[in-house]
Amino acid sequence: MTNLIYTPEKEIENRINSLKVAIDKAGLDGVVIVHHTNLFYFSGTSQSAHLFVPKKGKPLLMVRKSFKRAAKESSLDNIVEEKSIKKLEKRIFEAGYKDLSKIGLELDVIPFNTYKFYNDKVFVNSELVDASNIFKKIRLIKSRWEIDLLRTACKALTHGFGKVPALLKPGMTEIEFAGLFEAQLRKSGYGGCSKMRAFNQDFLFGNIVSGISGSIPTYFDGPVGGEGLTPANNPHGAGWKKIQRDEPVYLDYTCVVNGYTADAERIYVMGDLSEKFYKAHDNALKIQDELIRMIEPGVEWQTLYLKAVDMAEKFSMLDNFMGIGNDQVKFIGHGVGLELDEFPVFAKGLSMKLEIGMCFAIEPKFVFPDGAVGIENTFALRDDKVEKLTLFDENIIKV
């Protein structure tokens, strides 16, 4: 890939129009967007800026740095340079928006001290309220443009999986193998940052573990952890362990290309595995295939999770499903897009329903003291079917 891709004007226009409807319905006079993910989604740029979107009228993008890049990347009409955050309210007034009684902010991610600054020093005449769910719900439904971008990211990830047999050697450390694999993703356009909305869930690239490393739990809200390189920073995924023959090598990776996040997992082995792992992996495939069969508009999110748990119990593997003991996670899939942890979330108690345009990963996995196996793929719910976007061999791959 050699060319930068900019979000089309029509795409931004459709998003802004959806946001205005939601703003009006919520009884807000407007919203101010500052978090990079939402900022990019609604303006087309991730530069340091504040985007004001009124319930009526044109949005105003106020850029601190870099104005030059923001003006090039965004298709919005009203883009101004503003170095001082304290002058944001004045800028909005000058643009003709005098009624700012109630303004929505991204209070799910804005730090408290930053919120206090906005409340006490910037928007002193406004009531500031949380509008985070408005943004999440609009971003939940992907356009054809977004699904095409997601498909490109998925192709890059599956291309990387295909390089594994030439990279994996007995005796190499997990982190050495991770570096070689990640280099393949970077060559395909991986931006090197997988964004998470959840607090303190940030991580880099993905997760490579081998054998017993697959049973080491971590802070990360996923079924498989890994020791990582240090307790100090990102204690997760590939560590100093040497990869041996006849043990499962588990690769669970994202690939973010043009902002959109592919997510998939595959199992490799140098040599062979015990029957236990093959049986568990086969059961994971059966769970995935049954969930795919169930997916259609109108299905409640929790239905997929409950079905997966029921199947794991019937396979007599519930104790190893999605982790071990207290470290088991209580979901079977999650939304993907500009962030890795978007809606929908397939978990008990979530009765929201699937809709056309939703994109998500499904990841049935089994964890044992001596290793982890399973499957994960990225999907899009299209007009007439669920489309699998990560197309690569799903069986345990012998190297």
Image (cartoon, rainbow, N blue to C red):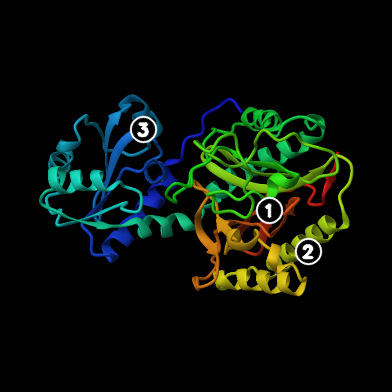
Which numbered disc flags the more N-terminal residue, 3 or 1? 3
Name the quadrant of the N terminus.
top right
* Closer to us: 48 or 220: 220
Instruction: Name the residue beneath numbered marker 1.
Output: 376
Instruction: Name the residue beneath numbered marker 3.
Output: 47
Indicate the secondary structure of the residue bearing disc 3. Answer: loop
> Closer to the camera: disc 3 or disc 2?
2
Indicate the secondary structure of the residue bearing disc 2. Answer: helix
> Closer to the camera: disc 2 or disc 1?
2
Label 1 near label 3: C-beta < 8 Å? no
Drawn side of residue 250 relative to residue 332, left or right: right
Drawn side of residue 65 relative to residue 143, left or right: left
Which numbered disc flags the more N-terminal residue, 2 or 1? 2
- Bin the neighbour count of mark 3 within 10 Å (Cα to Cα): few under 14, some 14-19, many 20 and up: many
Distance from Cα at disc 3 to Cα at disc 1: 33 Å
Please state the horizontal and vertical placement of residue 133, each as a whole percent of the image: 37, 60
For badge 2, the amino acid type reads Asn
Occupied quadrant, residue 319: bottom right
Label 2 near label 3: C-beta < 8 Å? no
Q: Residue at x 23, y 64 (%)?
A: 27
Occupied quadrant, residue 71: top left
* Closer to us: 97 or 393: 393
Which numbered disc flags the more N-terminal residue, 3 or 2? 3
Label 1 near label 2: C-beta < 8 Å? no
Instruction: Name the residue beneath numbered marker 2.
Output: 283
